[in-house]
Amino acid sequence: MARKYFGTDGIRGATNLSPMTAEMAMRVGMAAGAHFLRGDHKHRVVIGKDTRLSGYMLENALVAGFTAVGMDVVLVGPMPTPAVAMLTRSMRADLGVMISASHNPYADNGIKLFGPDGYKLSDADEEAIEALIDGTVPLVPSAEIGRAKRIEDAQGRYIHFAKSTFPEDLRLDGLKIVVDCANGAAYQVAPSALWELGAEVVAIGVGPDGRNINAGVGSTAPGVLQETVVASGADIGIALDGDADRLIVVDQNGAIVDGDQLMATIALGWARRGRLNGGGLVATVMSNLGLERRLAKEGLELIRTKVGDRYVLETMRSRGYNVGGEQSGHIILADYGTTGDGLVASLQILAEVVRAGAPASEVLHHFDRVPQVLKNVRYDRGAKPLEGSSVIEVIAAAESELAGKGRLLIRPSGTEPVIRVMAEGDDAKQVEATVDRICDAVRAAA
């Protein structure tokens, strides 16, 4: 069933425009609250947010919706998305809500929902909530309206949890770490956790003003981090995104280390210590072929899924893997959490650097990336360019050319009328030419 409001990661959009309005947030609170009123116990929802100006508006609207259907609300303020998932479970709440548009600009916002187990909601739950959003939700009698309470120690709880994932026999003493918090949700917790573990911390992107989240800082804009690492003589740099569920690392030379290298670092380290479950890791179809080949040398397998962390997590859970993620730096470690956690993943990376006693550039480089080219072709809505016979023929010829020495991926975007054409292989010129031929064919058929 096509969903009206929920995308691959909750509800998201420009604030004060449908669907991201205060009215919609209140209706989401009423609908989600009513859906999760199960049993006779007093029901509770945990609400966190990032640092966007619109977070106040949406937070208050959600509180109104949840309390109107009889749910108590626990407000934790600016907190990483994974912290909300963790607190939802630890506080035995019925539901968790994160108000964030992740790496998007400040004018956007979103609502992510977590079930009592800390996992993002199933399609069935989201469809049931959508039906209630557009329907009539019964309100409770006045005596049963819920209460709202803000807890002040939520940050300390999450810092304690994050530190508990770092090996007890290790410390960060002697490491100089630059951490870029994107002026987002982790601007207090990430520097504190690293400092408490012994690191010398240089913090940037820690001055949120409601409008500067992700603005020229964070995992999607690592330039300032690169410059700061080199200028300060730091050993490593860590960049989180606005809601801190993903990370990118910079080595001591200022070179970017992407999610594929980070997943390899964790998976290979865990495999050496007998901690890796499933015999490999789970990543999306966008992960580089170099990662797949590197794992194969160690007898490990790369399982690929559709783009989106929810598909990675579904495969991890169904097949028993405990490491997975995306090239963008969204890394899921099932031993510690139910969603991507940039801080926890960074602590695992730092543990490998400490154990090796070597520069980050050596510890975090496990393979040379296979040349990869990705281009987009826009088409008119309603057209079906991938069904044209000429396009099918060009794609078949390209697959034959790359067989055994590369990989081809062609997929329509899930959010806009765009065909994404990606190829990778050992011959960079061949890969570029292959992508261009397919793009030309798609344009001609569009």
Image (cartoon, rainbow, N blue to C red):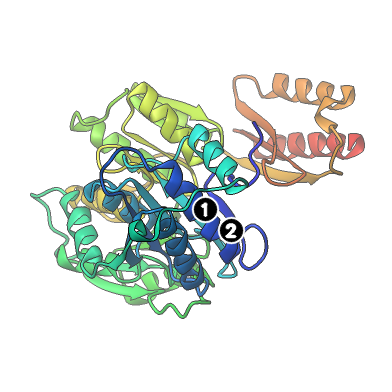
Q: Quadrant of the C terminus?
A: top right
Q: The residue under label 1 is which amino acid type?
A: Val
Q: Quadrant of the N terminus?
A: top right
Q: The residue under label 2 is which amino acid type?
A: Met
User: Of helix, strand and loop, which one carries label 1?
Assistant: helix
Instruction: Residue at 40%, 79% (x, y): give it.
Output: 207
Compared with residue 342, is residue 105 higher up or lower down, i.e. above or below?
Answer: below
Instruction: Residue at 52%, 71% (x, y): give it.
Output: 54
**Disc 1 to disc 2: CB gap under 8 Å:** yes
Q: As rendered, which of 71 and 427 lies closer to the eye?
A: 71
Whole-number angstrom distance, CA of label 1 to CA of label 2: 6 Å
Instruction: Residue at 53%, 59% (x, y): give it.
Output: 25
Q: As rendered, which of 64 and 80 lies closer to the eye?
A: 64
Residue 349 seen? no
Instruction: Residue at 33%, 45% (x, y): give it.
Output: 94
Q: Which residue is mark 1?
A: 28
**Where in the figure is residue 291, as x and y percent of width and height?**
45, 34
* Position of residue 309 in the picture relative to residue 143 (left or right): right
Labels in figure, total: 2
Compared with residue 65, is residue 331 higher up or lower down, i.e. above or below?
Answer: above
Q: Residue furthest right?
A: 444
* Position of residue 56 in the picture relative to residue 174 (left or right): right
Q: Which residue is mark 2?
A: 24
Residue 163, image quadrant = bottom left
Q: As rendered, which of 434 and 12 lies closer to the eye?
A: 12
Q: As rendered, which of 382 and 228 lies closer to the eye?
A: 382
Q: What crowding class fits label 2: few (fewer than 14 Cα within 10 Å), some (14-19), or many (20 or more)?
A: many
**Where in the figure is residue 357, as x and y percent of width and height?**
19, 52
**Where in the figure is residue 233, as x and y percent of width and height?**
31, 72
